[in-house]
Image (cartoon, rainbow, N blue to C red):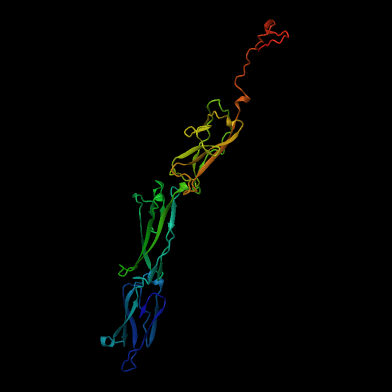
Amino acid sequence: MANAYDGTSLTFTYDPFTVVPSICPLTVTCEGVAGPSAAISCPTGPFTGAFTFTESYDQASYLGAVAPGDYVYTFKVSTGGADPLHNPTFTVTQTLLETCDPPSSITPSSPSPLNYVLGEAAATRNVAEFTVVPSYCEVDYTATKQDLASGDSPITIASNNRDFTVSYSTSLVPATNSETLTVTVTATSKTRWGAATGAITRDATFDVSFTNPCIDTTYVTITGPASLDNIEYTPETGAETYSAHAAFTTNIVSGASHSLCGDITVTGQFDGSDVTGDPLAYNAANRQFTADSTNIAFNDMTKTYGVTAMFTNWPQTVSNPSAPKATATGNISFKDACDTPSVFTASAAGSFTGGNGVGGASIYDGTASSF
């Protein structure tokens, strides 16, 4: 009789021995059960005449105390006398099959790839338990991971070997070098009853990639003044330096803290183009504009001026169209120096000369007088 812990019944039917004379009574008793565990015992007896007994084993039996292997029932048939010839024995073997060494199959789960944004809060990935048939068979999980080319290890493996954490804020190199790290989870079958002799293994893998937060405003922005002061300048009056505008700063959208994006470069613009010094120059260190021009063509004009802030190492370009950029603008009005001259002094009055009268006066004789 064999059973694979599947809940099916095992039935033994006893056909009575023949005794001569037939009037002698026969009694059958179970003397004991020998096997790999003590969880199986004799059926209740004694029995007279034909009898059957039925056993059934399932998942709970395997997970409990009923070990797989051969269990030998010993029965004694007796006529009541003491002579061993009158007390023959017979055995019945019941086999419980080891269904987990190996199991029928192990099917790995399918974890999805994990992308981690550098500098952000840790990202996690759980690898679901593998599917084992029969379902009551157990496996041991182990895990391996790759490290970065630098030797740094951004991946942490939990004690269950199925939960993983990724965190890294040392540099942007994993993203700029397009590094991809592979994590492997291995399930190895085992038995509850001694050392496995037919263990099988199966693997599940997933890749970890990295994103540069400094080229995407989803993760990082640049904040600064909403606008610049409206200013005035009069050409031909020399240089004039204006008050510093507010600083531009890095804003990490999620609230995380890192300095991966580096410095911010701020440039000045006049009338839609970078400043050239005439009529405006820009000092980024001091965050100040200086106007200086002798070009009176600007007189009575109003132009736009402004600043643009981008990360020094990650400016917004065709290849990085979503990189952070911030701008602020104001108006500069050019005045005409002649509208409000700084000095206006009248010269002394002259007099007529050259006439034939007194003091250059004319006496109506046609003589010219000059002024």
> Which sits in the foreground, 281 or 370?
370
67 left or right of 117 in image: left
Quarter occupied by residue 342: top right
> Which sits in the foreground, 78 or 362?
362
Name the quadrant of the N terminus: bottom left
Q: Could you say where residue 97 lies in the image, as x and y percent from the top left? A: 35, 75
Q: In this view, does 58 lie above or below 303?
A: below
Which residue is at the far top? 358
Q: How many labels does the image show?
A: 0
Q: In this view, does 83 lie above or below 206?
A: below
198 left or right of 167 in image: left
Residue 68 can be seen, yes or no: yes
Name the quadrant of the C terminus: top right
> Which sits in the foreground, 118 or 191?
118
Residue at the spot 34% in from the left edge and 51% down from the top edge: 149
> Which sits in the foreground, 238 or 338?
338
Residue 163 can be seen, yes or no: no
Quarter occupied by residue 26: bottom left
Residue at the spot 37% in from the left edge and 61% down from the top edge: 185
Q: Could you say where residue 87 lies in the image, as x and y percent from the top left? A: 29, 86
Q: Could you say where residue 248 lies in the image, as x and y percent from the top left? A: 50, 38
Which residue is at the far bottom? 21
Which residue is at the far right? 364
Q: In this view, does 345 lie above or below 178?
A: above
173 left or right of 301 in image: left
Q: Could you say where residue 212 lies in the image, as x and y percent from the top left? A: 44, 49
39 left or right of 293 in image: left
Quarter occupied by residue 303: top right
